[in-house]
Image: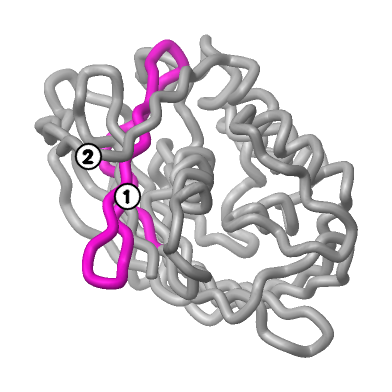
Amino acid sequence: MTSIDLSYLRQWIGRQAHAADSVRPMAARQMAAALSRGHRVPAQAEELPLLWHWLCFPSIADGSELGLDGHPARGHFLPPVPLPRRMWAAGRLALHRAPRIGEPLRRESTIADVKAKDGCSGPLVFVTVRHEIEADGQPCITEWQDIVYREAAKPGAESKPILAAEAALCETVPLNTPLLFRYSALTFNGHRIHYDRDYATGVEGYPGLVVHGPLVATLLAGLLERMANTGPVRYFEFRAVRPLFDFDTVTLCAEARDGAVSLWARNGSGHLAMSATAR
């Protein structure tokens, strides 16, 4: 079992990084095409759809600076967690106003916390990153991202699947390799579990290519925007429950409850893959 020196990893708390970017109209057009969900493509100066700000601020590193998994090597901004598997476990966003196509954006990123716990597959390390995104000196989005690191897959170590609920509003979306490739390209995400089948199955032990957690969250956000009478979204959170794979389908579900909207995604077997809440 891998030894975790938590006191050392927690020395990264407070570390910051700064970036500047904008969403080009072409990038928005490409995202709409990749999602294939009938999006009207936002034009210059129009508001970005919910979660499309993930087109901005990619982690750019020279090819010589990448780790085995395709991500930038750990130990610079993110702490050097000595566990091979990395996933985006959850996220929370407070939306002050939507960024607009073409406007200059700035982001300040801070390592907010590093925690360790034991899971059914062994030790887990959670790194929370807080992002503050602004335009013209005014806040747009405050976001928290929870990244989880874990050991390689072990036989019989997977958590028990949770049966997802039914809902009046559901849409089923096919998953496939081109969708995963396009989303990786649009977000400059080099993580090999999303496009390198030999690596995903042979090294990290998955049964297929893994669907990006942010992609599933973006699909849920698209369902939310197609709902009637929900009003502007001020807060959105999501939690990955079970991985989705390229050979499966995902069914997006939503239900309005007491001024909020509950959303969830289930796989082709009916098991809960992601839960989300919008207010």
For the N terminus, the quadrant is top left
Q: Give 8 or 95, whichever is nearer the viewer.
A: 95
Q: Residues within 10 Å of mark 1 (few under 14, many from 20)?
A: many
Q: Which mark is residue 167?
A: 2
Q: In the rendering, which numbered label is found on residue 243? A: none
- Residue located 66% across and 78% down the image: 140
Look at the numbered disc 1 and give the secondary structure of its residue.
strand
> Which disc is residue 263 wearing?
1
Q: For the residue marked with disc 1, what is the amino acid? A: Leu
Q: Quadrant of residue 248?
A: top left
Is residue 38 on the magenta stretch?
A: no
> Is residue 202 among the parts visible in the rendering?
no
Image coordinates of residue 213 in percent, x first then y, are 45, 41
Q: Say whether residue 128 is left or right of residue 262.
A: right
Q: Identify whether 178 is placed above or below 52.
A: above
Q: Residue at x 51, y 26 (%)?
A: 193
Specify the segment rendered in magenta.
Answer: 237-262
Q: What secondary structure do most residues of the magenta stretch adopt?
A: strand
- The quarter of the picture where residue 116 lies is bottom left
As for residue 239 lying within the magenta part, the answer is yes
Q: Nearer the viewer, mark 2 or mark 1?
A: 2
Q: Residues within 10 Å of mark 2 (few under 14, many from 20)?
A: few
Residue 64 locus on image (x, y percent): 78, 37
Q: Is residue 166 visible?
A: yes
The alpha-carbon separation of the residues under discs 2 and 1 comes to 10 Å
